[in-house]
Image (spheres, rainbow, N blue to C red):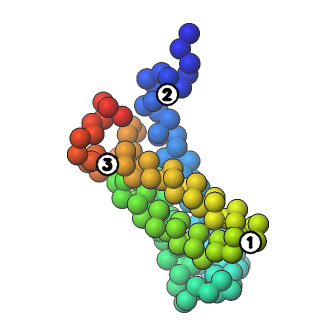
């Protein structure tokens, strides 16, 4: 009996599911940053409280990045580039919102960001795989059949 995770369909479609889940995560987060809403104001206040300069502009840019890169991941359009952008974005979140590791909530935020970055690193290396609108070329020496 072959275990499900050792089958060819799993190898082909698990990266697609992961990519869509990552995109959905960032789209969900962007929902709370829609400019002009009450939650947007809360995000601006929280960002200013942790020392982010020009918090209103930063939250608006975060909204744009999360929506743009989230959709790109879901549809598989230049997903390697979108993942790289989200890695930088998530690292900034970790630095600003998870800097006090003696506070358990901030420590959880920091390590959650590291987990997201770890998954996005895979997407940034291997790209969209199947079910993608447009792809970035794979790094030298990698082929779609070896992935």
Q: Quadrant of residue 8?
A: top left
Instruction: Point out the residue furthest to the left here.
Output: 140
Q: Position of residue 22 (x, y in %)?
A: 54, 52
Classify mark 2: residues with Cα within 10 Å, few (<14), some (14-19) or many (20+). Answer: few
| Residue at image coords 63%, 60% | 111
Q: Quadrant of the N terminus?
A: top right
* Residue 128, quarter of picture: top left
x and y percent of residue 86 in the render? 47, 63
Instruction: Evaluate whether residue 48 shows in this view.
Output: yes
In depth, the one of 33 and 22 nearer the eye is 22
Name the residue nearer the viewer: 39 or 43. Answer: 43
- Quadrant location of the C terminus? top left
Packing grade of label 1 (10 A; few <14, some 14-19, many >=20) is few
Look at the picture and state if 82 lies above or below 63.
above
Can you identify the residue that label 2 sits on? Answer: 10
- Expressed as whole percent of the image width and height from the top left, the position of residue 100 reads 69, 75
Question: In this picture, is 125 found above or below 42?
Answer: above
Q: Which residue is mark 1?
A: 102
In the image, taking residue 82 as reference, residue 89 lies left or right, namely: right
Q: In the displayed structure, would residue 21 be above or below residue 38?
A: above
Q: Which mark is residue 134?
A: 3
Among the two numbered marks 1 and 2 on one chain, the one whose residue lies closer to the N terminus: 2
Mark 1 → mark 2, Cα distance in angstroms: 40 Å
User: What's the residue at 60%, 77% (across, down)?
Assistant: 96
């Amino acid at each position: 009996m072959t275990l499900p995770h050792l089958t060819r369909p799993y190898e082909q479609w698990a990266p697609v599911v992961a990519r869509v889940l990552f995109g959905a995560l960032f789209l969900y987060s962007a929902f709370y940053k829609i400019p002009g809403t009450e939650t947007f104001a809360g995000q601006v206040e929280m960002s200013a409280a942790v020392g982010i300069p020009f918090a209103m502009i930063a939250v608006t840019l975060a909204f744009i990045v999360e929506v743009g890169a989230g959709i790109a991941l879901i549809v598989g359009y230049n997903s390697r580039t979108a993942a790289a952008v989200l890695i930088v974005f998530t690292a900034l979140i970790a630095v600003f919102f998870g800097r006090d590791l003696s506070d358990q909530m901030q420590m959880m935020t920091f390590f959650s960001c590291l987990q997201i970055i770890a998954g996005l690193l895979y997407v940034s290396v291997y790209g969209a795989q199947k079910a993608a609108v447009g792809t970035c070329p794979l790094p030298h020496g990698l082929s779609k059949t070896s992935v």
